[in-house]
């Protein structure tokens, strides 16, 4: 099939179709569970929000890495990464955070004055665990990333038009310090937003663990989307064995890093054997979470590790797309295992959590898919390469 007769990529329509289905399913489940006991609905929304927050920040880390190191292999998928971190997506995250912020005392023990007054440990942590810090670590952080991601995308667009290398330098100069700030910002964000759901428990590796998981989800989603489009314009001849090998190798590295963080956290907790730390794993040993921990050992580590390690898998875009779809799906299981036990949802089989996932996922996919339709589909770098070798 030639480039002239090849069909156009269907990434945007696929994403928007998924978004519509998720929104419909989420709305139906929300109608079934709205008003459930224990403020289940707002807690459930937390889970859906957490998944797509981690996914967005996973894409954001890849964007910073692309611009900071001036990557070449990731140019074909930069538009997809930009769409997932567009200002419109960050506006959705900011708006989605409003109902959570208005219900802090329902979700977090540290936001309930009665609990705080009777708990010396929470009083000791009150300088960080308070509504003002929550506001800064969420709304303030998202606003900053909105501005930075918008600037990087605009400079990339200017470079695409005129090929002037000053835009590349500006992008690298902004992205380089932002990678450091991104790691620090994620540490504060995930500590107050997710880890403080269990306010007596803490782990110094937890924010990095969630960050790496988000990057894995973003890489899996990227492989799934573009791998299935390798025979369509504008990806013909671009999403090839070399591209598949590069993104597969990066996915292997993040898989190993996720495994290291996961095992390290468990091993340190097990060896310490202190009640205030072991309670986190004890709460996840009850059904169905004990079963999910076994699923994660196989699905998030063993299977991806063996397949990513196999060079033919990394050289075949279609095989990589299938594996990317698996990695993206297992990220749902991982976040469910991490977040839902801390929400103390009263409903089994946790329909409220799935309602929140559908609602937030529908909005995220619709926005990211719409943003993808507004962008030129490929960053070729032809003008830039010519300037470099002039």
Image (tube, rainbow, N blue to C red):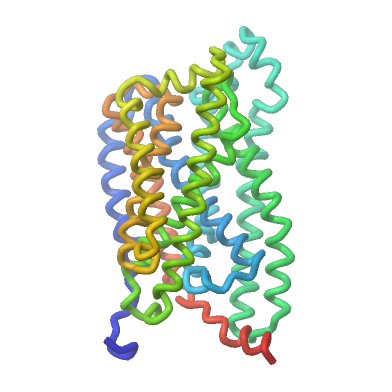
Identify the image quadrant of residue 346: top left
Q: Residue at x 34, y 74 (%)?
A: 230
Is 377 positioned to the left or the right of 362 in the image? right
Identify the image quadrant of residue 42: top left
Count how many numbered circles sit on residues in the image: 0
Q: Residue at x 60, y 32 (%)?
A: 192
Q: Nearer the viewer, residue 303 or 18?
A: 303
Vertical comparison of 107 with 149: above or below: above
For residue 92, say whether it is visible: no
Q: Of all residues shown, which one is farthest toward the top?
A: 118
Q: Residue at x 57, y 25 (%)?
A: 268
Q: Nearer the viewer, residue 132 or 387?
A: 387
Give how far across and how far down residue 92 sits, in percent.
Answer: 50, 51
Identify the image quadrant of residue 137: top right
For residue 167, say whether it is visible: yes
Q: Nearer the viewer, residue 359 or 243?
A: 243
Q: Residue at x 36, y 54 (%)?
A: 307
Is 352 positioned to the left or the right of 246 in the image? left
What is the quadrant of the N terminus in the image?
bottom left
Q: Nearer the viewer, residue 15 or 238?
A: 238
What is the quadrant of the C terminus in the image?
bottom right
Give how far across and how far down residue 129 sits, in percent.
Answer: 65, 26
Give how far across and how far down residue 289 sits, in percent.
Answer: 35, 27
Is 366 positioned to the left or the right of 28 in the image? right
């Amino acid at each position: 099939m030639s480039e002239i007769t090849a069909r156009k990529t269907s990434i945007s329509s696929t994403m928007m179709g998924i978004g519509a289905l998720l929104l419909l399913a989420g709305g139906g489940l929300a109608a079934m569970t709205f008003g459930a006991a224990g403020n289940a609905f707002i807690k459930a929304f937390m889970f859906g929000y957490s998944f797509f927050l981690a996914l967005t920040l996973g894409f954001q880390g890849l964007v910073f890495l692309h611009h900071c190191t001036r990557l070449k292999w990731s140019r074909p998928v930069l538009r997809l990464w930009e769409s997932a971190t567009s200002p419109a997506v960050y506006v959705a995250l900011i708006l989605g955070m409003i109902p959570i912020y208005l219900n802090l005392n329902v979700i977090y023990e540290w936001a309930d004055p009665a609990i705080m007054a009777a708990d010396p440990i929470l009083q000791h942590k009150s300088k960080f665990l308070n509504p003002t810090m929550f506001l800064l670590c969420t709304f303030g952080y998202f606003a900053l990333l909105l501005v930075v991601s918008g600037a990087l995308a605009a400079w990339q667009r200017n470079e695409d038009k005129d090929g002037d290398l000053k835009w590349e330098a500006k992008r690298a100069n902004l992205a380089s310090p932002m990678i450091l700030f991104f790691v620090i910002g994620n540490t504060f964000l995930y500590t107050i937003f997710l880890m403080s759901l269990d306010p007596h428990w803490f782990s110094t590796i937890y924010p990095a663990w969630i960050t790496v998981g988000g990057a894995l989800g973003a890489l899996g989603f990227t492989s799934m989307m573009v791998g299935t489009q390798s025979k369509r314009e504008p990806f013909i001849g671009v999403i090839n064995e070399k591209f598949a090998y590069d993104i597969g190798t990066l996915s292997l590295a993040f898989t190993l890093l996720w495994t290291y963080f996961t095992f390290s956290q468990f091993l340190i907790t097990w060896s310490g054997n202190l009640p205030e730390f072991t309670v986190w794993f004890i709460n996840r040993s009850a059904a169905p979470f004990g079963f999910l921990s076994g699923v994660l050992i196989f699905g998030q580590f063993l299977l991806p590790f063996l397949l990513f390690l196999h060079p033919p898998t990394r050289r075949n875009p279609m095989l990589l797309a299938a594996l990317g779809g698996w990695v993206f799906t297992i990220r749902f299981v991982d976040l469910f295992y991490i977040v839902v036990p801390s929400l103390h949802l009263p409903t089994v089989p946790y329909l409220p959590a799935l309602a929140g996932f559908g609602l937030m996922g529908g909005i995220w996919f619709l926005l990211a898919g719409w943003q993808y339709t507004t962008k030129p589909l490929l960053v070729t770098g032809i003008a830039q390469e010519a300037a470099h070798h002039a």
